[in-house]
Image (cartoon, rainbow, N blue to C red):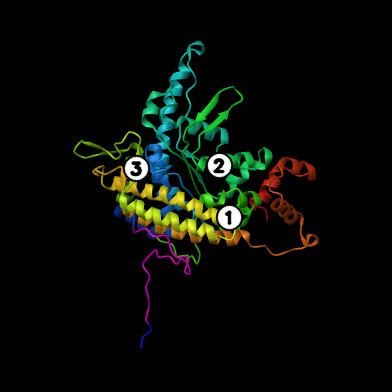
Amino acid sequence: MDEKITIKPKGSLSLNKQRPELPIDGLPASIQNYINAVCGIYHCPREFVTTAVLATASTAIGKKVVVNEGIYKNPLVLWFVSVARSGSNKSYPMKLVTQPLRRIDEELYAEYKREYDDWKAIPAKDRADEPKCPAIVLDDCTDERRSEILFMNNDTNEPQNQSVAKRGNKRGAIGIYPELKGMFDSKNQYQNGGTSAISKLLRLFDCEDIKVDRKNGFTMLIKDPFFNIIGDLQTGMLRSTFGSELFMTNGLNQRFLFSVAEDIEYPHRSHETLPYGIACEWAQTVRMLYEGIYHSPDGNHYTLVRSTDGEVSLGKEADALYDDYHNYLQDKKAMADCDYVASIYSKLQIQVLRYAGIVHVLDLAEQRGMRCDYNIMRKEPMEYAIRCMEYFEQMALLVYSRIAEQPPIVKPEQMNKTELLSAFLRLYPDVPQGQLAKLIGVSPAYISKIKSGKTG
């Protein structure tokens, strides 16, 4: 008898064989089609593409929608981290999926540049305040610039720039970080070992108002800041990125939704490319969410969310599902054997609402503004979001086990200089890098490389 041969579909993946995969069946058909096409052609973990899609959609809709579950109003802010070995195609899906946001960002810059040139042409004595450049995508920028962007993204600010204010009403913003560890390392270069910058991050996830006092005397009050984060990380960098005592105790880790891909296959080169129509449809969806309007080919325009405050309430069935899930997590918190794990369940109670809210607005976009009950969440997005949270719960527990396990013990006398410094920085992550470098006679850049794990 001939041996049975199993042929896998082109672009298939073998990920997390012992754990569940992140489902996509609750997403609109066009979104599923896009995710499957990207995964099939670029052979990247489906979780990584899915989370990039959700982060992009959330940023595009921005502050135009909040989920009101009866007590709290929840913006659609979520932070995602993709974790896999080097060479597993973590970064490119993130770059590809978020490309429509960068195109919008380029348009904002072009409009700013025109206004800046007009402002520069006016005699200095007659000029108003210098225009500022708005943005929705943040890469390498200071905390001060991030605060400036979030301030301009308020719907009542930018009095000097009414045209941008109209287009960017209630804009969102997203930080995109290939190799996420670099973001944390840059913050550790500031005073107090970066704890001040990390405290701001904690407040950004909670969307709390932030007041920023600047040296030049201008104080910014950032109302309801909206800041998403998406990044990737090598598996071997998990402990050095998230394993510090600060991150293990202040709740930062639990604010991230992790996707961990394992047992990755490495296929031979393919010459396929993403079909133009599929890529174009995704770009149009992102644009529709950003504008909040579907422009019909017949010339009519349909608003996706027509309520002025953008509140989406839970329908009766969605509310019952959330009630059961919330109480289920309450019971798990009571049985948790440590505060870290209990905090995972606390954050899932918030993240499931935000996740379901993103799926809801993707449904609105799929139906081109034809939903009469646009301000009511049906049961399907909630049911799907709860199933997704089961995946993220297991990933959070997996990450906790990885960063909490003790590394092999090596005696100090067996370590070289780099290993000694690395061990010291793990034990004392809050020591200012500049002071440590001066004390031992090396450059701050050298200390930074050790913290990032980039020294050979």
- Is any part of residue 161 visible from this angle? yes
Q: Is residue 14 left or right of residue 433?
A: left
Structural crowding at the residue carrying mark 1, measured as other residues with C-alpha within 10 Å and reported as few (<14), some (14–19) or many (≥20): some
Look at the numbered disc 3 and give the secondary structure of its residue.
strand
| Image location (x, y in percent) of residue 16 | 48, 66
Magenta region, mostly helix, strand or loop?
Answer: loop
Structural crowding at the residue carrying mark 2, measured as other residues with C-alpha within 10 Å and reported as few (<14), some (14–19) or many (≥20): some
Magenta highlight range:
4-25
Which label was assigned to residue 201? 2
| Image location (x, y in percent) of residue 201 | 55, 42
Amino acid at circle 2: Leu
Judged from this view, the residue extending furthest toward the top is 125
Does the magenta-highlighted stretch encompass residue 366?
Answer: no
Q: Earlier in the sequence, mark 3 or mark 2?
A: 2
What residue is at 33 percent from the left and 33 percent from the top? 308
Q: Is residue 171 left or right of residue 398?
A: left
What residue is at 39 percent from the left and 53 percent from the top? 322
Q: Quadrant of the N terminus?
A: bottom left
Amino acid at circle 3: Val
Judged from this view, the residue extending furthest toward the right is 413
Mark-to-mark CA distance, 3 and 1: 31 Å
Mark 3 and 1 residues: CB-CB less than 8 Å, in contact? no
| Image location (x, y in percent) of residue 208 | 50, 37
User: Mark 3 highlights which residue?
Assistant: 312
Judged from this view, the residue extending furthest toward the bottom is 1
| Image location (x, y in percent) of residue 314 | 34, 47
Disc count in the image? 3
Amino acid at circle 1: Tyr
Look at the numbered disc 1 and give the secondary structure of its residue.
helix
User: Mark 1 highlights which residue?
Assistant: 340
